[in-house]
Image: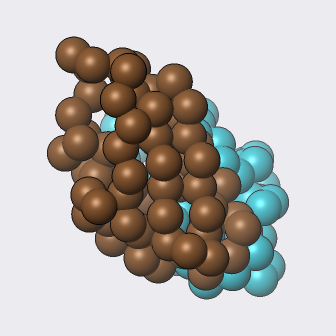
Chain colours: A cyan, B brown
Amino acid sequence: MQTIILNISGMTCGGCGNSVTRVLQALDGVENVTVDWQAGRAEVALQEGTSTVADLIAAVEDAGFEARAN
Amino acid sequence: MQTIILNISGMTCGGCGNSVTRVLQALDGVENVTVDWQAGRAEVALQEGTSTVADLIAAVEDAGFEARAN
């Protein structure tokens, strides 16, 4: 298991945070997601050999937010 | 071209509206999307024979919102 921290911009309420949480949870190998929309931060527990950090970033960006690995 | 109206609950700011817009725009056959987050409403111009209304609803729900066809 690895922990990935993403910095995410564009989350402006708890609904945005919920949306980011959901799109990350849908990815292969994601075991746990914690999003702090006010801090612009997501912490993702990810099984190794499954989704990549680029996959996580792409999913968040497809949902309309900007993301980068911390 | 057909126009689909979805009623969507859970959008609580413009960032949520942007997220819903993005996930709908990503679907096959979607030509135009207009989301009014305050009204809880999305209008989708959809090419026939491509995505279904159920596909639209599933995409919105995967992003963490509740949707139903109007």
Residue at 61% across, 63% down: B36
Q: Nearer the viewer, residue A14 or B37?
A: B37
Establish if A26 lies above or below A5.
above
The x, y position of residue B68, in whole percent, is: 26, 63
Residue at 35% across, 43% down: B4
Residue at 64% across, 43% down: A61
Establish if A65 lies above or below A38.
above
The quadrant where residue A43 appears: bottom right
The x, y position of residue A40, in whole percent, is: 77, 71
The x, y position of residue B22, in whole percent, is: 58, 43
Establish if B59 lies above or below B49.
below
Q: Nearer the viewer, residue B53 or A66?
A: B53
Quadrant location, the C terminus of chain B: bottom left
Q: Is residue A38 left or right of residue B68?
A: right
Quadrant location, the N terminus of chain B: top left
Residue at 33% across, 70% down: B66
Q: Is residue A29 visible?
A: no
Q: Is residue B62 left or right of residue B37?
A: left
The quadrant where residue A57 appears: top right
Q: Is residue B9 left or right of residue A56?
A: left
Establish if B27 lies above or below B24.
above
Please count the marks in the image.
Answer: 0
The quadrant where residue A41 appears: bottom right
Q: Is residue A9 left or right of residue B39?
A: right
Q: Nearer the viewer, residue A70 or B50?
A: B50
The x, y position of residue A45, in whole percent, is: 45, 63
Q: Is residue B22 visible?
A: yes
